[in-house]
Amino acid sequence: MINVIGGGLAGVEAAWKIAESGIPVRLFEMRPKKMTPAHKTDKFAELVCSNTLGGKDIVTPRGLLKKEMELLDSIVIEAAKKSEVPAGGALAVDRDKFSEFITEKIENHPLIEVIREEVTELPKGEITVVATGPLTSEPFSKYLQNYLGEEELHFYDAISPIVYADTIDYSKCFWGSRYGKGGDDYLNCPMTEEEYERFYNALMEAEKVPLKDFERACYFEGCMPIEELAERGKQTLLFGPLKPVGLVDPRTGKRPFAVVQLRKENREGTLLNMVGFQTKLKYPEQKRVFRLIPGLENAEFARYGSIHRNTFIKSPKLLLPTLQLKKNPEVLFAGQITGVEGYPESAATGIIAGMNAVRLYKGEEPIYPPRETMVGALLNYITTADEKSFQPMNANFGLLPPPERKIKGKKERRKYLAERALREMERWLKELV
Ligand code: FAD
């Protein structure tokens, strides 16, 4: 018997994978006895907000991820295809049909025992997948905090946008750290007073996503959005994330009026994180306003900024890429709680956790897909990112190792990466058999 805690996107994938491998599963789900602040039904895999699972084309990050999930026999993708509604290039679903399809499959599987109870501690001595999601119940969060360490579980994310490095105009920026400390760790985008004024006004006028009631406490946790800081006065940002102190623009020999700093997000340097730019601005507004920053006029965003109520663990410190807990390898984590962000991303990690729970049960070595695949790249990211600044991550092409040769054009490059990923996933799956 294997336990899965949480019947969301990740939990159903894990439970399904285990049961389909012929091993009995106990699936714990606290709804409807105890609801989260976002779920409205007692159905498994409820989509709590938008009804889209992202682009369909494999040259989009989520399109590629979903294709890989299909190769991994994902129940979420099967349900999405059965409940698809027209949405241009995106895979959108009728949310009720989607979760009803999954609920019926799960409840009728002879090897899945559904237990509608809140779990408040880990079962002892049994293989267990934890997939309790971004709104993990309070008692279980507290338990995990005790079990993993006070500092290792976060209750909010404060995400700054991430830009694809190859979409920046480097002629307008310079590398260097404040006062020369730390070498060339930061890319600095200097602003004149007029440029700052234009940026500031646009930021003040931009449309924001309203906070949900259960997210309000967030601001007391030191994750102040950049636009909120700006509202305190025009000078505030100049003493905060845009402070120019300790920096000299080599092109002018002078200290700029303001500086936006970007830091490498991954080892390859294909992704750059906008330091201190956590925000509640709507996505199109982020694109419009942040493109006013010199050097970012044509920037493409791998991840937009956000601030959410979100439970996630410090995976780079705690997890192996197989999703096993380092301190107790019989416990695996899956879904948003691992620090991936989004529906398909959460579901994909559920599949891998399910596969590895099965392997552990059979006494086999746990595994994970190659880094060239989107699933493998996500697992690699969440388990190797910088521990201190770790924040959730969605699927994006910057996570994949760059092409072995130079390929001109964004579309061509993505096509190459996507085809390579799918070849690698197929090869990996063949070798597993
Ligand atoms: P969930 O799908 O939330 O599943 C976790 C399950 O565990 C739930 O059913 C819950 O009831 C159960 N549970 C929790 N604690 C316990 C316990 N102690 N015992 C037993 N059961 C428990 N992503 C997108 O791609 N698009 C969006 O539009 C989107 N909107 C979001 C809106 C909100 C408000 C939130 C919080 C997140 C949103 N996300 C969105 C992020 C994320 O993709 C989803 O939350 C996704 O459902 C995560 O999958 P999961 O399986 O990790 O968690």
Image: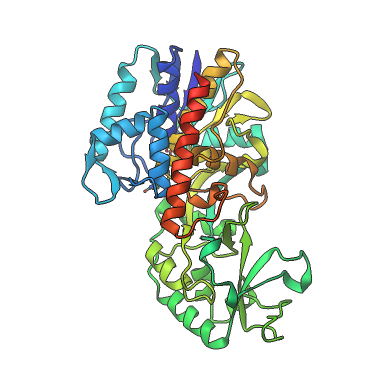
- Residue 163 % position (x, y): 52, 61
Q: Nearer the viewer, residue 428 or 161?
A: 428
**With respect to residue 394, does 233 lie above or below?**
below
Determine which quarter of the picture holds residue 71: top left
Q: Residue furthest left?
A: 86
Q: Is residue 205 above or below residue 411?
A: below
Task: Examine the rendering and report whether any part of residue 30 can be seen.
Answer: no
Residue at 59% from the left image edge and 16% from the top image edge: 364
With 319 as the anchor, is 377 left or right in this view?
left
> Number of numbered discs present?
0
Residue 211 lies in what quarter of the image?
Answer: bottom left
Image check: 13 left or right of 319?
left
Residue at the image position 32 percent from the left and 48 percent from the top: 50
Q: How is the image coloured?
A: rainbow
- Name the image quarter holding residue 96: top left
Residue 154 position in % (x across, y down):
58, 45
- In this picture, is 181 found above or below 132? below
Left or right position of 407 against 69: right
* Depth order, front residue of 190/72: 72
Q: Residue 200 placed where, x, y %?
A: 49, 79
Residue depicted at 56% across the width and 50% down the height: 402
- Residue 393, given in percent of the width and then of the height, sits at 52, 48
Instruction: Note whether 312 is above or below 108 in the view shown.
Output: below
**Residue 1 visible in image:** yes
- Ligand 1 picture quarter: top left
